[in-house]
Amino acid sequence: MNWTLYIVITATLTALLVGMYHFAFYRRYGDGWPGKMRTGDPTYWPLIIGFSLAFAMAIAELILDWPARVTPWMIVGWALLLFGNAWNRWAYRTLGEHYRPTAHKPEGPVVRVNKAPYKWMRHPLYAGQTVYLIGLMLGVDADVSWLGLAFFLPPLARRVWYEDALLKIRG
């Protein structure tokens, strides 16, 4: 694999994805200057960058090292990718108007969602994202791109801890 090209493709895709996610979140949830949307949330940027980097690494590896044949693990990966995406969409739709891309919502009462899938697990959105990325890594037959999870999982763990701490403080 051409490592220089891999790094260039990964960096380009990461920058595009971070910009796209932030713009989409700002358009939907921002009120005024983009900085207001994420006030008080130290996990916003690390989580977006970590997810985008892991995704971009897998796509760059797929572009530069196209698999010679389809393996059973690749089929399992694509199934996990589809399942993770469907699970994520279900969790997102269950939250409805209560979803925010940040972990900080300073005004208003705390709303607890107790419908499925939230009655089965505490953070189904994050579980869906993780299953999605693992499926992507398996689906593209990644070798190096598994390291991308090292950029996603620590910010994700921090977000989970941060959200749980906020819920304890706010009731």
Image (spheres, rainbow, N blue to C red):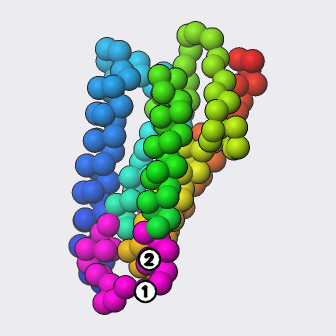
Residue matched to label 1: 71
In the rendered structure, the answer to whether residue 59 lies left or right of residue 37 reads left
Q: Distance between the residues labelled 1 and 2?
A: 7 Å
Nearer-the-camera pick, 49 or 112: 112
Q: In this view, does 157 lie above or below 166?
A: below
Look at 39% across and 59% down and name the residue there. 55
Query: Residue 139, labelled with which disc?
Result: none
Nearer-the-camera pick, 149 or 123: 123
Residue 133 percent across, percent down from the top left: 47, 60
Magenta region: which residues? Answer: 59-78
Q: Residue furthest front?
A: 116
Q: Is residue 88 above or below residue 29?
A: below
Residue 28 figure quarter: top left
In the rendered structure, the answer to whether residue 105 lies left or right of residue 171 reads left
Residue 25 percent across, percent down from the top left: 36, 31
Mark 2 crowdedness (10 Å alpha carbons): few <14, some 14-19, many ≥20 = some
In the rendered structure, the answer to whether residue 117 lies left or right of residue 145 reads right
Residue 65 figure quarter: bottom left
Q: Do the residues labelled 1 and 2 touch (CB within 8 Å)?
A: yes
60 in the magenta segment: yes
What's under tag 1, amino acid-wise? Thr
What's under tag 2, amino acid-wise? Ile
Q: Is residue 90 above or below residue 32?
A: below
Mark 1 crowdedness (10 Å alpha carbons): few <14, some 14-19, many ≥20 = few
Of the 4 image quadrants, the one containing the N terminus is: bottom left
Q: What element carries label 2?
A: helix
Look at 53% across and 33% down and name the residue there. 94
* Camera sees residue 138: no
Nearer-the-camera pick, 132 or 56: 132
Q: What element carries label 1?
A: loop
Residue matched to label 2: 75
